[in-house]
Image (tube, grey):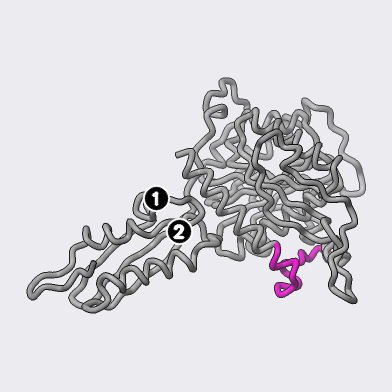
Amino acid sequence: MMYPKKEGFMVTRDEVIEVLKHVTDPEVGRDIVEMGMVRTIEVKENEIECEIILTTPACPAKNKIESDVKNILNQKFGEKYKINVIVGSDVRKAPDNPIYRASGARIINLDNIEKIRNIIAVYSCKGGVGKTTVAVNLSIALAKYGARVGLLDLDLHGPNVPTMLGLIGQPKVKDLKIIPPEIYGVKVFSPGLLIDRSFPIMWRGPIQTVAVKQLFEDILWGEIDYLVLDLPPGTGDIHITLSQNIPISGMVMVSTPQLLAIIDTIKGVNMFEKMGVPTIGIILNMSYYLCPHCSRKIHIFPKVNIDDYSEGQKIDILGELPLDPKIAELSDRGIPIVIEDEENYISKLFADISSKVASNLSTISIKKS
């Protein structure tokens, strides 16, 4: 149905809103008006201007939503009005999960993280699966989309983030609070910046809990859209402390594709789900080797079907990353692959994965709100 412009009359804002209710976010399945994505509508003499605000700058459906809005407005009003659609983004703060809200005796003061909108924990129950490599490149990929990103290294026994980013020297301090250094558009802090990296960190459980408390209370993050946590492997004191004290928005699991690693990963999923922390999805790292001569994918580890072992829980596969010596070489040099070679297919995989992480997190947040 067309809305003809009658002599002396203009299309109203309400009429435009009714039309926009037919545009849906394909990731969530709800219309953009219901989701509060229509920020402003201005009807001028010969122009309709509409501002659409996405839930994340990394939205994979950005082009489709923008195209759908333009098409439907042109279809309804294009004969009489020029259509101008402006698309921006505003990352929303994730709602606290019910179990976290109900937690009584918290030991961590959250004043320094109250301006952080989403906390993403990158985790693997098994060590040696490339979790830190994923956390570093994921953080930078999110920042490349225009998000404000922080990266906190919580792998206290093996804080390797500084090495992978080429960070050296102790951070600045202001009013007894640490100012995290910024590199590649990401604010970063790691205990590795405070110690001699050649010496092992030997802390018992209670000391680890105190260290985690200090890391959240003593760092000035400022305004952050996504704070990425690089967690240690296992199911120990750090994980329990975080779940009970920190409003984690969601978990990104990292695993290699073979059975034993997947079984351990499912254990980690179940642990965090019991603590009320949702799973954003899983990244299968070192899934295959790409032959440099014929470009054929060679699966080094036997791949299993995750659904067969997830006890009915649907776990979204965010992406599959190859085993590639270039990633290791660049990590050792302190230059993440998403920085050194943006056109590399692995960098593009990280871009796609980061977009899915942001999109899935938005979906989780919307469903919980």
Q: Is residue 335 above or below residue 267?
A: below
The mark that comes first in sequence, 1 or 2, is 1
- Residue 220 percent location from the top left of the image: 60, 47
Question: What quarter of the picture does the N terminus occupy?
Answer: bottom left
The quarter holding residue 333 reads: bottom right
Residue under label 2:
54
Query: Are there few (<14), some (14-19), or many (20+) residues within 10 Å of tag 1?
Result: some
Query: Are there few (<14), some (14-19), or many (20+) residues within 10 Å of tag 2?
Result: many
Whether residue 346 appears in magenta in the rendering, the answer is: yes
- Residue 61 percent location from the top left of the image: 51, 62
Q: Is residue 246 visible?
A: yes
Left or right of 250 on screen, residue 332: right
The quarter holding residue 123 reads: top right
Q: Nearer the viewer, residue 266 or 118?
A: 266
Q: Is residue 102 above or below residue 137?
A: above
Q: Is residue 229 visible?
A: no
Q: Give the magenta-colored segment's residue range.
A: 334-349
Task: Name the residue type under label 1.
Answer: Met
Q: Which mark is residue 35?
A: 1
Task: Name the residue type under label 2.
Answer: Leu
Residue at image point 45% right, 51% down: 29
